[in-house]
Amino acid sequence: MLPLSREAPGCADALGYSPGERCQRAILTGLFESCLLTVNDLLRKPPAQEKDFAEQLSQQRSRALAAPSHLLPPCLRSPPTQLSRQQLLGGVWLQMEAAGPEDAPCPRAPPETAGAAAAPPRSFPSLLLGIKGKLCTCHILKTVALGQVLSLFICGTAVASQYLAEQYKVNTPMLQSFINYCLLLLVYTTILAFRRGSDSILQILKRKWWKYILLALVDVEANYTIVKAYQYTTLTSVQLLDCFGIPVLMALSWFILRARYRLIHFIAVAVCLLGVGAMVGADILAGRQNSEGSDVVVGDVLVLLGASLYAVSNVSEEYIVKNLSRVEFLGMVGLFGTFISGLQLAIVERTDIAHIQWNWKIVLLFVAFALCMFGLYSFMPVVIKVTSATSVNLGILTADLYSLFFGLFLFGYQFSGLYLLSFGVIMVGFVLYCSTPTRTAEEATTSVPQPASIGFDNLGLKIEENHQETPAATVQFTKEENVQVNMG
């Protein structure tokens, strides 16, 4: 069969067009009309403008029928011989590109943002509903609930330690940590011991033993320095300077985990720190700052050191639980943490342990502390895996407030309305941080810059967006009149 553009002479009409050319122009006219209708649909014209648009469409169709072929768009000069009219007029916009280097592409439909810009402004109630739909999602509520469970575990350890110190004059933070590491050793290291293959404990020790020794050392000293700082400085200094770990954690996540933050994340962190400031102000007004400490400078340095060590430990934990295994992290920390804390216990707290007047109440408080700490260590990797170390540290800022609420009944603290205000401010900042996922920058394998991919932080927020993406279609005409359709 001859191509449509090669009809025999002598069959032309009054305008000089052959039957094949008339058929060609009918198809192209329908295609042009479909393109204009698609543009109209994307622009979402209001009903008042439909009549004007119909008249404009009729004029464009008449001009297209009467125009010579050299005035048509380049990609429409050669007819698509291998696509039916129904395929071309199916209502889906196809990006048309000519194969020749001299040809220019056809005009494309305007983006959807044009229709959004023409839309009327949203009312205030609808705006509130949109904000509520973004902030009150199942993922955010789950993240907030998990963060508060961690805060309650920390509150339990704080109340048990304070009760031991005030009622029984027992100050043995290393002994309390040693019991926790022993529980991790008995549970998670035992699980690793029964594994076989590349995940067995022997293979892990052969490849990464020195890394886990450093990680366990950082974790043990972070726990010890923060508790030790209370002996030298005030509660206000500890609460304020302990927040230094959050910017350190964000910086380490930026360089090590390649996390990329947005403006809303920095605003959320600032809001959380404002809530901490309100909590410290409530402590001062309630008269809880009775002691100035024996050496404020030493205490402040210990707080900063402990906060930085916590940041290193949390970033390492996030990397391990998201790329390796939660059981591997807890098993290795339990194994080496037991030896390191046991050695340090024998050096620094040998005398303090000998002076303890043991009874069932003291034993019960030690057990309560150990169980809360074990629950914190076991549950935190689960929360970090679905969120991030930064969001977890923002969520557990409320742990001090829970301790204060318990102190109202156990230690006779005075209540202040600023406690409720600080709790609300911290929760607002935490929800703001979780409302927008962070991104993870991918290392470029070529000279072409690669787009950033969705990071682990708040990944559940992007699940629906992935289902809404529509593949693009490209139709390309070659000089031999073959049609190539590429689905992107």
Image (cartoon, grey):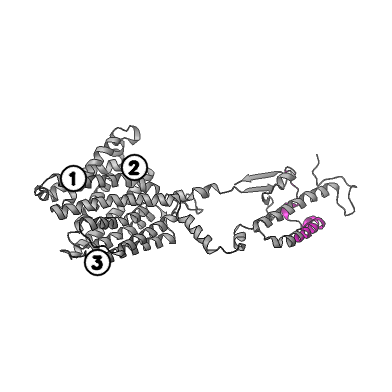
Camera-side mark, 2 or 3: 3
* Pointer 1 or 2: first along the chain: 2
Q: Is residue 457 visible?
A: no
The picture places residue 243, in percent across and down from the top left corner, at 30, 60
The kind of residue on which mark 3 rests is Ile
Q: Which residue is mark 2?
A: 326
Residue at the far front: name it.
Answer: 409
Camera-side mark, 1 or 2: 1
How far apart are the alpha carbons under marks 1 and 2? Answer: 29 Å
Q: Secondary structure at mark 1?
A: helix
How far apart are the alpha carbons under marks 2 and 3? Answer: 40 Å
Residue shown at 28% from the left, 53% from the top = 310
Q: Secondary structure at mark 2?
A: helix
The picture places residue 254, in percent across and down from the top left corner, at 39, 56
> Disc 1, disc 3: CB below 8 Å?
no
The magenta segment is 55-83
Work out which quarter of the rendered image holds the N terminus and state it.
Answer: top right
**Magenta segment: does it hold 75?**
yes
The picture places residue 268, in percent across and down from the top left corner, at 39, 60
Q: Which of 18/185 is in front?
A: 185
Q: Label 2 crowding class (10 Å Cα cut-off): few <14, some 14-19, many 20+?
A: many
> Disc 1, disc 2: CB below 8 Å?
no
The dot on residue 284 is 3
Q: Which residue is mark 1?
A: 364
